[in-house]
Amino acid sequence: MNQVFESCKAITFDLFGTILDLEGSIKPHISEFLQDFQTEISSEGFWQQFRHRQRIEQYQDSLMGLGHSGYLETVKKSFNYVCELNKMETTVKQVDTFMDNWKSLSPFPDCLDGLQKMEKRFSLVALSNGNPWFLEHLVKNRIKYPFDAIISVEKVGSFKPYPGVYRRAALEIALEPNEIIMVSSNSFDVMGARTCGFRGIYVNRYNLPFEDTHEQFKPDLTVVNFEDLSRALLM
């Protein structure tokens, strides 16, 4: 095991994009949705525009201080924005169908086995931007893994990487920040956790660059999936 993790007792996991395969789960529904329109945008292009807009919606939500709206609310706002951007007039039913699809998110196939291996050494905690009821549903019915705790950012009222999210997680877990590892496929999430004293592991499934940041805020380790992750933490 990497020496920086020897004193760690818990791992907090991002869910969206790290354990749950957002792109693989939602893009097929986008392809089906686009068949109702005469548009040049592909499902890949729509997905990229949507994810970009969702990040903006989340940052605006945190920065403007007008009250936390919630993860699914940013999903809906982003979907409506991208539809309008591409001159697609949607019906209430089409929007509702898109939102319902998020209840059927599927985990990456490597995650469950990796979690079951890591539970022998660490407490495992879900730390997510999701609405509390949505997280409960996804953990119970889609991921099907009994995390030691499920922590939603709604307890703080801001999306990650707001520092209070990680500090609240440390408080809830009752550990010092440097005893916790943040595992995420979102580089901003790992960076945010590192600025708060967490150790950080970047699950780089898509060979993306990490944030341009100070050396001390970069991940302690980068892996490509949960098989690599469990091997690195347990050997």
Image (spheres, rainbow, N blue to C red):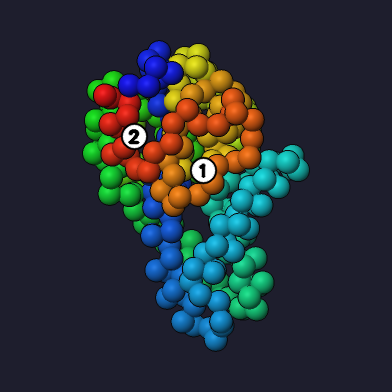
- Which disc number belongs to residue 35? none
Residue on which disc 2 sits:
229
Local SS, label 2: helix
Bin the neighbour count of mark 1 within 10 Å (Cα to Cα): few under 14, some 14-19, many 20 and up. Answer: some
Bin the neighbour count of mark 2 within 10 Å (Cα to Cα): few under 14, some 14-19, many 20 and up. Answer: many
Q: Is residue 114 left or right of residue 203?
A: left
Local SS, label 1: loop
Residue 234 occupies quadrant:
top left
Residue on which disc 1 sits:
186
Q: Is residue 137 visible?
A: no
Q: Nearer the viewer, residue 22 or 131?
A: 22
Q: Position of residue 49 (x, y in %)?
A: 59, 64
Residue 116 occupies quadrant:
top left
In this picture, is 108 found above or below 40? above
Q: Position of residue 40 (x, y in %)?
A: 56, 82
Quadrant the N terminus occupies: top left
Q: Residue at x 44, y 25 (%)?
A: 181
Q: Is residue 63 left or right of residue 46?
A: right
Instruction: Give the mark toward the camera: 2 or 1.
Output: 2
Q: CA distance from mark 2 to mark 1?
A: 15 Å
Quadrant the C terminus occupies: top left
> Residue lying furthest front in this view?
215
Amino acid on which disc 2 is placed? Leu
Amino acid on which disc 1 is placed? Asn
Choose the circle earlier in sequence order: 2 or 1: 1
Q: Residue at x 67, y 45 (%)?
A: 59
Residue 67 occupies quadrant:
top right
Q: Residue at x 50, y 31 (%)?
A: 219
Q: Nearer the viewer, residue 69 or 84?
A: 84
